[in-house]
Image: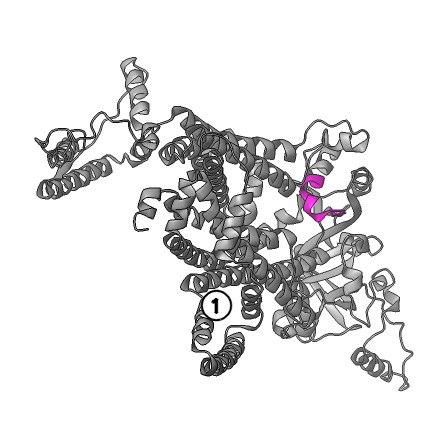
């Protein structure tokens, strides 16, 4: 053994004994900390020690303690603390004693001593500080750029626009989702560029530098943001400054999950940049040409053969069994015909028959080609399933959003306390805000509604029939037989047949004094009320029936004392919104009737409709600025229905992650396929390297082969997924409207998420091809040509 070689002997009995002793010491330390109730103080130090910053922070703490800046707190259980520390140190001492350098061999230097070192090994360096700075600084800069751009673009940047826009917001601002998309793309570009520059500088992948950079400079930001949701002091210090960031992160219901997903995406961009930089500059100079590598890769795998693509597409469109049956029938018929031809040829010319049989065997697919077809099909199945499921879930979300926004407003303006007595003046001010296309006043409260058949608790809403149609879809949701105008003209409400019979019997009663029918009295005109279809079925009433509304809040003085306020209404119409919660709990009356019934001067608030529902939050903030801020407030539809839509987005995200596992399984097939290609083409790789193709060129070839599989599978999955979505949309999968409140399975194809499914497939296949490509580049020409 050469003295420079490093050999280590492990004494396993000492190692196991040391680990056991160290574990006992850790238990004793934990008991001491628990007795002192100091886990809150110790947890931070342990966390810092875990990531490697503990020693530096403890040094600063020791300096501050020496200067008298801090006072040590009394620790309970000193014996357990001292014992635990000593046992912990003893355990690590035993572990250190169990690791020893092997004794050096007495052999002298080899015959090659003093010869020039192999060029690749001669250029090798253990560590590149500049690469560490590029990786770590790049990931940190990408995170800071994301936070800064999201805040600036959402809050507003200086603008030269005049008039109402500048008066409302003071600058040009974007919707939070669009601002996040721009900030995310820019930060991904920053992370990719930093990885490219670092790998180009080192001319290798430099994974140790990347790990240290991400671990020490990338992790603090997502950790800090995650702690901000739980630590009140951080929330007070950073919450207001990062309110736009936390709002976007909260759209999926779990801000911490959003932070770590974005961090993972930035790390992925860094890895892609590192790999691209190594490929481009691995030969010592930047070479972005791909023509030769793509030509070789296309000849190797032949992914884009019509037979392979058509077969995979048939499997995706019609399932596995029917295409396989057709395939085996066709192949069996072709083989039978070919064997008959070879047999006839062999009777005439045996040599020509042998040559024909050899050509027939060459046309048979190799195992590598079969695995290539399976890899393409696996990626296609994953993309197709991802597109179909996400499109169906988007259809449910769009249908739910349409029903909610058809019944509720896009935004609501109100006061923090009290009503809006001067709502007319407020509406005139709100009208000047760009983006507001409709507004209507309302009064809302909770009451009980009773009929002769049942009683129920509902939410009553006073509305203005003239302007409510500019904000909600209530006029369109009224079922035949009712009319929203009957709220203003209740005399037009036609009594139901049951009411007419009761009134006719009452009118036909004889006067007890004169013994003749009394003169019918003029029927009382009751105010109108609009109720939901489910509520009408529960109360067993129809248009024209009488119902009583009882308010426990507003009381009237009766003979026996205070009693709940009650008033009779006549059903003026029945609406159907498509949501059970609204159809069973909402009723509408005239705004003036609500003012009289609840003794309210003015209105509870003003409902707004905006031109772009995705921009409702920014417009709501502009409305508050126009009104002068406090005591006015504005809530958009996303804030009012935050829990519901956050749950839907989180469900869609989780389903997307779960279905992406199919693509990851296909990536395993791609790894196996490319490794088999490397084993099959060792001789060709050696020849290419002997002709001067650098390692980066070999990596390009096999990465291109993996990318071709990913692109082919992604395109086939995209085509088949869109075809199935269109089939579901046009032909339809029927559902029971009484159960699901929709007649068929909804589908909504969103271009962004559809393209994202294909991008995910291509990225996964690209990452899966990196390891086989690196193994191919490590093949030496001598090793590959040794057996030739």
Residue 431 at what x, y percent from top left?
A: 81, 41
Quadrant of the image containing the N terminus: top left
Is 114 one of the magenta-colored residues?
Answer: no
Q: Position of residue 456 (x, y in %)?
A: 64, 67
Identify the residue shown where x is 53% and y is 72%.
319
Q: Which residues are magenta?
A: 606-620
In this picture, is 5 found above or below 601?
A: above
Instruction: Write the residue at 54% across / 65% down.
Output: 308
Q: Is residue 607 magenta?
A: yes
Which residue is nearer to you in this view: 591 or 557?
A: 591
Residue that numbered label 1 is attached to: 363
Q: For the residue carrying disc 1, how many other residues have a C-alpha within 10 Å: few (<14), some (14-19), or many (20+)? A: few
Q: Nearer the viewer, residue 201 or 59?
A: 201
Residue furthest top in the image? 67
Residue, x 62% and y 47% (percent of image)?
Answer: 639
Is residue 75 something that shows in the picture? yes
Q: Nearer the viewer, residue 535 or 101?
A: 101
Residue 723: image location, x then y, percent: 64, 66
| Residue 761 visible in image | no
The picture quadrant where one finds residue 575 is bottom right
Q: Quadrant of the rendered structure where residue 539 is? A: bottom right
């Amino acid at each position: 053994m050469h003295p420079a070689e490093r050999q280590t002997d492990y004494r396993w009995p000492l190692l196991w004994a040391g680990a056991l002793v160290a574990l006992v010491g850790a238990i004793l330390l934990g008991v001491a900390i628990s007795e002192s109730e100091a886990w809150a103080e110790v947890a931070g130090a342990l966390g810092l020690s875990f990531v490697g910053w503990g020693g530096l922070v403890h040094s600063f703490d020791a300096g501050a303690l020496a200067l008298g800046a801090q006072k040590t707190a009394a620790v309970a259980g000193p014996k357990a603390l001292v014992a635990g520390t000593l046992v912990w140190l003893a355990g690590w001492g035993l572990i250190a004693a169990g690791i020893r350098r092997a004794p050096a061999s007495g052999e002298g230097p080899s015959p090659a001593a003093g010869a020039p070192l192999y060029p690749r090994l001669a250029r090798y360096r253990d560590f590149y500080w500049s690469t560490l700075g590029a990786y770590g600084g790049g990931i940190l800069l990408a995170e800071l750029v994301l936070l800064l751009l999201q805040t600036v673009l959402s809050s507003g940047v200086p603008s030269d626009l005049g008039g109402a826009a500048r008066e409302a917001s003071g600058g040009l601002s974007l919707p939070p989702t669009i601002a996040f998309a721009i900030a995310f793309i820019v930060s991904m570009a920053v992370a990719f560029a930093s990885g490219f520059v670092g790998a180009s500088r080192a001319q290798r992948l430099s994974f140790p530098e990347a790990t240290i950079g991400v671990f020490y400079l990338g992790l603090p930001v997502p950790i800090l943001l995650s702690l901000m949701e739980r630590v009140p002091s951080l929330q007070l210090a950073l919450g207001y400054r990062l309110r736009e960031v936390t709002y976007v992160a909260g759209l999926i219901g779990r801000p911490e999950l959003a932070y770590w997903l974005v961090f993972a995406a930035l790390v992925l961009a860094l890895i892609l940049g590192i790999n691209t930089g190594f490929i481009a500059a691995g030969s010592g100079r930047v070479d972005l040409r791909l023509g030769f590598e793509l030509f070789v890769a296309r000849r190797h795998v032949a992914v884009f053969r019509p037979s392979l693509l058509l077969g995979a597409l048939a499997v995706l469109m019609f399932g596995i069994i029917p295409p396989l049956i057709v395939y085996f029938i066709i192949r069996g018929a072709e083989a039978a015909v070919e064997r008959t031809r070879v047999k006839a040829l062999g009777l005439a010319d045996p040599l020509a028959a042998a040559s024909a049989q050899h050509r027939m065997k060459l046309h048979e697919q190799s195992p590598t080609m079969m695995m290539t077809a399976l890899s393409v099909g696996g990626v296609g199945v994953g993309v197709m399933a991802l597109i179909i499921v996400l499109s169906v879930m988007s259809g449910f979300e769009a249908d739910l959003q349409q029903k909610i926004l058809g019944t509720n407003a896009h935004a609501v303006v109100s006061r923090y306390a009290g009503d809006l007595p001067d709502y007319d003046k407020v509406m005139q001010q709100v009208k000047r805000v760009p983006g507001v296309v409709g507004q209507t006043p309302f009064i809302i409260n909770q009451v009980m509604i009773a009929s002769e058949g049942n009683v129920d608790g509902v939410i009553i809403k006073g509305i203005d029939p003239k302007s409510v149609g500019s904000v909600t879809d209530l006029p369109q949701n009224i079922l035949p037989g009712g009319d929203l105008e009957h709220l203003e003209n209740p005399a037009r409400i036609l009594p139901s047949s049951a009411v007419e019979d009761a009134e006719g019997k009452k009118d036909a009663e004889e006067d007890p004094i004169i013994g003749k029918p009394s003169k019918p009295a003029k029927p009382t005109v009751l105010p109108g009320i609009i109720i939901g279809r489910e509520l009408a079925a529960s109360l067993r009433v129809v248009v024209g029936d009488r119902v009583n509304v009882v308010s426990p809040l507003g009381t009237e003085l009766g003979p026996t004392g205070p009693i709940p306020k009650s008033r009779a209404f006549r059903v003026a119409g029945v609406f159907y919104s498509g949501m059970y919660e609204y159809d069973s709990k909402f009723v509408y009356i005239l705004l003036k009737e609500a003012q009289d019934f609840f003794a309210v001067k003015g209105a509870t608030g003003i409902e707004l409709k905006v031109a772009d529902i995705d921009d409702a939050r920014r417009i709501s903030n502009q409305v508050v600025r126009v009104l002068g801020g406090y005591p006015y407030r504005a809530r958009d539809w996303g804030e009012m229905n935050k829990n519901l839509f956050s749950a839907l987005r989180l469900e869609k995200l989780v389903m997307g992650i779960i279905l992406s596992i199919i693509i990851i399984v296909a990536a395993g097939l791609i790894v196996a396929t490319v490794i088999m290609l490397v084993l099959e083409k060792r001789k060709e790789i050696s020849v290419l390297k002997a002709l001067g193709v650098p390692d980066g060129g070999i990596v390009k070839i096999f990465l291109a082969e993996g990318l071709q599989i990913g692109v082919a599978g992604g395109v086939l999955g995209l085509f088949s997924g869109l075809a199935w979505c269109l089939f579901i949309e046009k032909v339809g999968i029927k559902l029971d409207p009484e159960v699901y409140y929709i007649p068929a399975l909804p589908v909504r194809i969103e271009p962004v998420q559809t393209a994202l499914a294909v991008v995910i497939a291509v990225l996964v296949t690209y990452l899966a091809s990196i390891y086989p490509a690196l193994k191919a580049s490590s093949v030496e020409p001598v090793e590959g040509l040794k057996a030739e």
